[in-house]
């Protein structure tokens, strides 16, 4: 018996094995095809109910199987799962195209779109109708048969290429290790980092210490390791992932993906891939994105250059460094930060035990939104490290199940993300509550101490839980408009705004306590954390702008004549480069956000969302960071509404006006008042 073919709410992780996936996909695809055909072949007049709504709720089994499978492909993968993904992805792309290019189906959707009195539909129904129609029109429904066939070919080629890109990055991350056996090689590293490195070495059957490219290993070494040559080695390895002209090289994948995306956009009548993407974003056009990034660049670059000069002089004074390189940045920035603020991540870490930080983010959201969290052990998981929770509202009603997967391991991609195993929606009168998951890569507990987070990791946990709240508190009718199903340049608002509480004394008092003594985080350290938050913000902003410009460079023009990924990247970075280039490195070949994930022509949205989150948090601060009235507005107009209305409409309803950039510039120390 195949457990994936039976109805389930919580995924049956323990009874699913690799051989179940492909048959389940094939079965679910066949069933979904029949559901689509029934809609397309219906003889009665097309209506919103029998066409748009029925289409929205078709393929539910396929959705559940796919969400389970692809979530595991990110968090608990193996060679077999990756092979299945390569087989299945083209079939899913074909299915999507079969829907989009189904002429009878499109005629019924178009008939409803053109003949329905929109005033008789609710706001959410109007949005669903518009979204369904645009899903066809923006994806080839109006093309002629020859053009439709070309679109199918492009999409079938793109799906495995994006998968291959991600797999190459993962393999490159996993195959590198820096094995150290001498004391001089580990000079400067904190005890917690050494313990973790020794534990990694032990797992690999080696003596000494092993440093990897996983963030909890890589970042502390770059920040604290005093051996400059080893920092260079590690930095070069990290920056050259999938850039070695071998079987895991992504240069050709980058060129092919961008060319196919461009071809696809042109086929659909758009100037570039960016024009296609941004039509469905708050920013609307590439020109507006460039204007936004250039405006920030003008304000950030002078500050970044001042900060670099200060850092260079500090490194020269401290160690006689004549020419600051990229692999020196984290190390000397940390030393300068300690010098200026007497604040040290390693001294802060004992106050941020993972368990307490989890409790802290729960307490913050409980205070804001009235949620109750219960950790449970009777929910199946895909790995023993995964924690499970039931979340209740103020009336004691279950509103979500939450999975938390916090530590790196083999078969789990790097980074941090929120995902879902089931979205919230209302079907046949029942409000189906979501299954939400946060996946991170925080340092594991060692034999001697629990998992302790850097302050940056604390903000990461809050960030991802902000995304989770967008899913947890969703309250919409239709799954495609639920939770995080919003414009990409709006989706980061709930996550980025929650980070702000990490800097507030009132919030830190809820959870920041020393794991040994239970002493609260001293208030002078809280003050220094807030002061240090502006430290090198010019350089940090310039870095984010550079990623946004690189993304737009790949996607807002014709890439057909690009021959060298590296040279093209250097040109895109020309206005934002601070350090000498390392010819052995290339960012594009591991820029998974835009070549594997959903951020192509959308990386600017991180800074865009910062404008939103700074402006929104400024509103909270005006009344108090736990103000119930503002929290209620945020929950009602932002978190619960998903994509049921245009983001600017929702934001203005919450804030009373459009967002302004002033609060962000002030927070980052980049405003005239801050300089």
Image: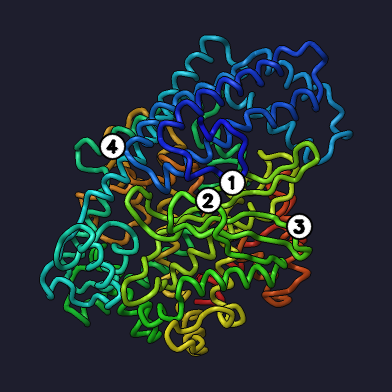
Q: Which mark is residue 10?
A: 1
Determine whether the residue tagged by mark 3 lies in a helix, strand or loop: helix
Which mark is first along the chain, 3 or 2?
A: 2
CA separation in Å, label 3 and label 4: 45 Å
Kindly tell me whether residue 535 is visible in this rendering.
yes
Q: 352 and 81: which one is in front? A: 81
CA separation in Å, label 3 and label 1: 27 Å
Which mark is first along the chain, 1 or 2?
A: 1
Determine whether the residue tagged by mark 1 lies in a helix, strand or loop: loop
Determine whether the residue tagged by mark 4 lies in a helix, strand or loop: helix
| Residue 472, horizontal then vertical, whole percent | 65, 54
CA separation in Å, label 2 and label 3: 31 Å
Which mark is first along the chain, 4 or 3?
A: 4
**Are the two marked residues, 2 and 1, in contact with CB atoms closer than 8 angstroms?**
yes
Of circles 3 and 1, which is in front?
A: 1
| Residue 87, horizontal then vertical, whole percent | 40, 26
Q: Which mark is residue 380?
A: 2
Q: 169 and 622: which one is in front? A: 169
Q: Which mark is residue 636?
A: 3
Q: Which residue is mark 4?
A: 251
| Rendered image quadrant of residue 9 | top right
């Amino acid at each position: 018996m195949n457990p994936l073919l039976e109805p389930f709410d919580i995924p049956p992780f323990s009874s699913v094995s690799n051989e179940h996936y492909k048959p389940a996909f094939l079965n679910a695809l066949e069933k979904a095809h029949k559901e689509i055909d029934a809609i397309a072949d219906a003889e009665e007049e097309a209506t919103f109910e029998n066409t748009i709504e029925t289409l929205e709720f078709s393929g539910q089994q396929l959705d559940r199987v796919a969400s389970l499978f692809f979530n595991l492909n990110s968090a608990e993968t193996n060679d077999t799962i990756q092979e299945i993904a390569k087989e299945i992805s083209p079939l899913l792309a074909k299915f999507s195209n079969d829907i989009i290019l189904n002429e009878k189906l499109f005629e019924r959707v178009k008939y409803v779109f053109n003949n329905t009195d929109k005033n008789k539909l609710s706001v959410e129904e109007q949005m669903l109708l518009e979204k369904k129609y645009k899903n066809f029109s923006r994806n080839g429904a109006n093309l002629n048969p020859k053009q439709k066939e070309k679109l199918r070919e492009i999409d079938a080629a793109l799906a495995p290429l994006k998968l291959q890109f991600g797999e190459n990055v993962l393999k490159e991350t996993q195959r590198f290790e820096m094995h150290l056996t001498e004391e001089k090689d580990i000079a400067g590293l904190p005890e917690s980092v050494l313990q973790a490195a020794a534990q990694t070495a032990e797992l690999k059957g080696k003596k000494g210490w092993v440093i990897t490219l996983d963030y909890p290993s890589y970042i502390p070494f770059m920040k604290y390791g005093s051996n400059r040559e080893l920092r260079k080695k590690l930095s070069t390895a990290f920056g050259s992932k999938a850039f070695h002209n071998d079987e895991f090289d992504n240069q050709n994948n980058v060129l092919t993906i961008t060319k196919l995306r461009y071809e696809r956009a042109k086929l659909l009548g758009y100037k570039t891939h960016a024009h296609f993407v941004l039509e469905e974003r708050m920013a609307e056009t590439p020109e507006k994105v460039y204007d936004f990034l250039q405006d920030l660049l003008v304000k950030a670059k002078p500050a970044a250059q001042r900060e670099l000069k200060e850092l260079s002089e500090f490194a020269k004074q401290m160690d006689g460094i004549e020419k600051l390189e990229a692999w020196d940045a984290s190390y000397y920035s940390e030393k300068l930060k300690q010098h200026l603020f007497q604040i040290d991540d390693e001294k802060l870490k004992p106050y941020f035990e993972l368990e307490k930080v989890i409790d802290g983010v729960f307490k913050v959201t409980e205070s804001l939104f009235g949620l109750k969290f219960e950790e449970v052990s009777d929910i199946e998981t895909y790995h023993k490290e995964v924690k499970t929770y039931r979340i209740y509202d103020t009336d004691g009603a279950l509103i979500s199940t939450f999975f938390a997967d916090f530590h790196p391991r083999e078969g789990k991609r790097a980074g941090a993300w929120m995902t879902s195993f089931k979205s919230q929606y209302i079907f046949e009168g029942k409000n189906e509550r979501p299954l939400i998951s946060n996946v991170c890569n925080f340092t594991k507990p060692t034999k001697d101490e629990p998992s302790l987070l850097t302050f940056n990791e604390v903000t990461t946990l809050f960030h991802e839980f902000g995304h989770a709240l967008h899913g947890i508190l969703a309250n919409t009718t239709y799954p495609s408009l639920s939770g995080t199903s919003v414009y990409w340049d709006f989706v980061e608002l709930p996550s980025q705004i929650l980070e702000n509480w990490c800097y507030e004394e009132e919030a830190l008092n809820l959870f920041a306590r020393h794991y040994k003594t239970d002493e609260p985080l001293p208030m002078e350290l809280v003050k220094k954390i807030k002061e240090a938050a502006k430290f090198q913000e010019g350089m940090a902003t310039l870095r984010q702008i550079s990623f946004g410009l690189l993304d737009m460079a790949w996607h807002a023009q014709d890439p057909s004549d690009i021959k060298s990924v590296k040279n093209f990247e250097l040109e895109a970075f020309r206005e934002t480069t601070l350090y000498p280039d390392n010819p052995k490195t290339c960012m594009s070949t591991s820029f998974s956000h835009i070549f594997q994930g959903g951020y192509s022509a959308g990386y600017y949205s991180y800074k865009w969302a910062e404008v939103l989150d700074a402006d929104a948090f400024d509103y909270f601060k005006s009344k108090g960071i736990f103000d119930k009235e503002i929290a209620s507005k945020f929950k009602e107009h932002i978190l619960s509404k998903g994509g049921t209305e245009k983001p600017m409409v929702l934001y203005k309803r919450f804030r009373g006006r459009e967002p302004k950039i002033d609060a962000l510039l002030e927070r980052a120390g980049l405003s005239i008042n801050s300089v």
